[in-house]
Structure formats: C-alpha cells, structure tokens
Image (cartoon, rainbow, N blue to C red):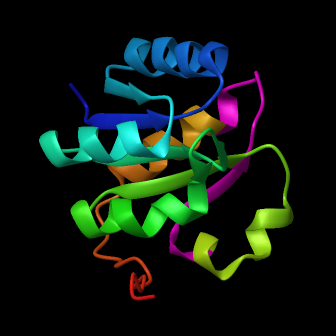
Amino acid sequence: MRGTILIVENDRGLRQLYQTALRQLGYDVLIAANGGMALEKLKSNSVDLIILALELSDGSGLQHLCKFMDVQRQAKVVINAGHTMAKWDFRSWAADAFLIKSTDLTELKNTVDTLLERELNVQSLPCSTSK
C-alpha cells in the first residue's frame, strides 16, 4: 500500500467514488460519514491523509479539523468543498490543500499523490482547541 487515506464525506455516492478511485491507485482507504465517525477512526488507525468535506451531518468539517489534528497531527489534510467560501475561513489554512468537489477525480488524485509522495518537513498551522 502507498499510504492510508481517511475520506470524511456526508454524501454516500461520493464516498464510494473516492474510495474506489483511491484504492485503484494502491492506497488503503477508510471512510466516515461524519466528523464523529472520523474521529473514532483516527483514534484507532494511523492515517497519512484526510479528505475532508465541509458539510457534515454533525457540523462543519472545519469544526472537526482541529480535533482531527489533535489526534493525528502528522496527517495531511485536503479540504474537499462544494464552494470556495470556506477557503477564506482561517481554520481552512491548517489544511494542506483546498479543492472543489467534482466527479472528475483528476485534481483530487493528483493532489493526493503529490501530498503523500512529497517528503518535505512542512508543519501544519497550529490549531487552538481552547474555548
């Protein structure tokens, strides 16, 4: 396997589409329908990259992002959004990439390959989980 990816996506069809495409590229793929499920997967599995939707049934993907990073700071994060508005939310800056959802998976696959094959020691921006 080339690495482990966690797909956090509310839409079942997109979860399955991404899972199939990334497995064909040789990645081990875990899926979660919401942030709570994703957090449980992160606590019990080592993950190299998270593909994170912004609209989840249990809150915004950005609300969950810092929790995910607290559990597995080394994981790369790709925000996969339906629109660009959240790109300007400072919490999205902690992600390594920001993509717009599409059924053409070329950009997603290229981004995943680039992030997981790149061997740079770039640290993500810190997230504050204090209230």
Looking at the image, residue 116 lies above or below residue 13: below
- The quadrant of the picture occupied by the N terminus is top left
Give whichever of 108, 110 is nearer the camera: 108
Q: Residue sitting at 46 percent across and 45 percent down?
A: 35
Left/right placement of residue 24 relative to residue 78 reads left
Q: Position of residue 57 (x, y in %)?
A: 62, 38
Give whichever of 124, 89 is nearer the camera: 89
- The quadrant of the picture occupied by the C terminus is bottom left
First to last magenta residue range: 93-107
Q: Position of residue 38 (x, y in %)?
A: 37, 41
Q: Residue sitting at 54 percent across and 52 percent down?
A: 78
Left/right placement of residue 112 relative to residue 101 reads left
**Residue 127, quarter of the rendered image:** bottom left
Q: Position of residue 14 (x, y in %)?
A: 64, 20
Membership of 43 in magenta stretch: no
Q: Residue sitting at 65 percent across and 13 percent down?
A: 13
Q: Residue sitting at 75 percent across and 37 percent down?
A: 101
